[in-house]
Image: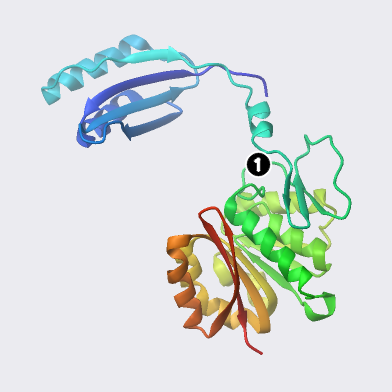
Amino acid sequence: MAASEQWRVALTVTGVAAAAAFAEAVGDGALAVSTFEVSEHGNDWLVETTWAAEPERGRLVARVAMLSRAMAIAEPVLTVEPLPAIDWVTRVYEGFPPLRAGRYFVYGSHFDGRVPSGTVALKIDAATAFGTGEHGSTRGCLLALDRLARRGRGRRRLGQILDLGCGSGILALAAARTWRVPVLAVDLDGESVRVAAVNARINGLAGLVRTGRGDGYRVGAARKQSRYSLVLANILARPLARLAPGLRRHLAPGGVAILSGLLARQERLVLAAHRAQRLVLRQRVTVGEWRTLVVARRG
């Protein structure tokens, strides 16, 4: 993808109601529309839109003038300017350097270096699904998987694995490559399921990683397998709490779940929901403001 030119249209008004009205007036046909409060006490709001090509300046000026008269306010200054051309492919690659998390080495197809010896290599490109390893919650899950493997959960003790809300499939791939056991990767988003299946093929794990689309444990493939030795759920705090009863039903006795996607202040909510299901906390991993919790079912 070559560098492309886009245009910015912006103005500043007072009050959230005015910001919403002007955003609608100047945002018709734009690629993106956003409003930001730019003063802590003055109640000033920046209305900003991004365009794929130069917009019709006269039409925008007329709309701003008409709306200003209708609202009986001073006409705000309208800025219409080209944005610097950006090579988005290069920008994405620069934002996704190779990452090391315990034994796992995550890299994109643009990486031309040498994979460190003794690591579990995962080739994951930044794409349209969440999970390339750089996010604190994903990194926390990889570190938890590494600790789990180091503590001796070998192949004989680990049955089928479920990755709930798989995104790019990075956690499913990491688990499949570590234990060489079947992994079911499910997500509510169809694009994530597609990307996860592609990444499984790229990493030579299509024979171990199956994908399915569905909400929580209600996806057909997840219902067929009643118990899992390991469940991975890197989603959000409230869905984690809501799904705690389902985790109890689907986690085998002695099974372990790695839960992430929660901030430090949300840990109490998530833990309380799982303790109510008689699941116990085994360990936590902290990466910045993110928490990853490892809980287990006794047995």
Residue at screen point 24% across, 18% down: 64
Return the x and y of residue 290 as percentages of the image width and height.
53, 57
Where is 159 relative to 138, above or below? Answer: below
Quadrant hosting residue 167: bottom right
Taking the spot 67% from the left edge, 70% from the top edge, the residue there is 221
Left or right of 154, for residue 185 = left
Tell me how the rendering is colored. Answer: rainbow
Side of 204 where 84 appears, left or right: left
Horizontal and vertical percent position of residue 124: 73, 46
Residue 29 can be seen in this image:
no
Q: Position of residue 158 (x, y in %)?
A: 77, 77
Q: Which residue is mark 1?
A: 127
* Residue with the most extreme top position: 58
Q: Residue at x 74, y 67 (%)?
A: 183
Image quadrant for the N terminus? top right
Q: Using the image, determine if residue 23 lies above or below residue 224.
A: above
**Does residue 162 sit above or below 298 in this rendering?**
above
Q: Is residue 180 left or right of residue 33?
A: right
Query: Along the line of sight, which residue is nearer the eye, 39 or 48?
Result: 39
The reply to whether residue 249 is visible in this rendering is yes
Q: Secondary structure at mark 1?
A: loop
Which residue is at 64% across, 62% downward?
A: 186
Q: Quadrant of the C terminus?
A: bottom right
Question: In this view of the protein, which residue sits in the foreground, 289 or 178?
Answer: 289
The residue nearer to you, when weighing 52 against 130, is 130
Amino acid type assigned to the residue bearing label 1 in the image = Ala
Looking at the image, residue 246 sits to the left or right of residue 138; the answer is left
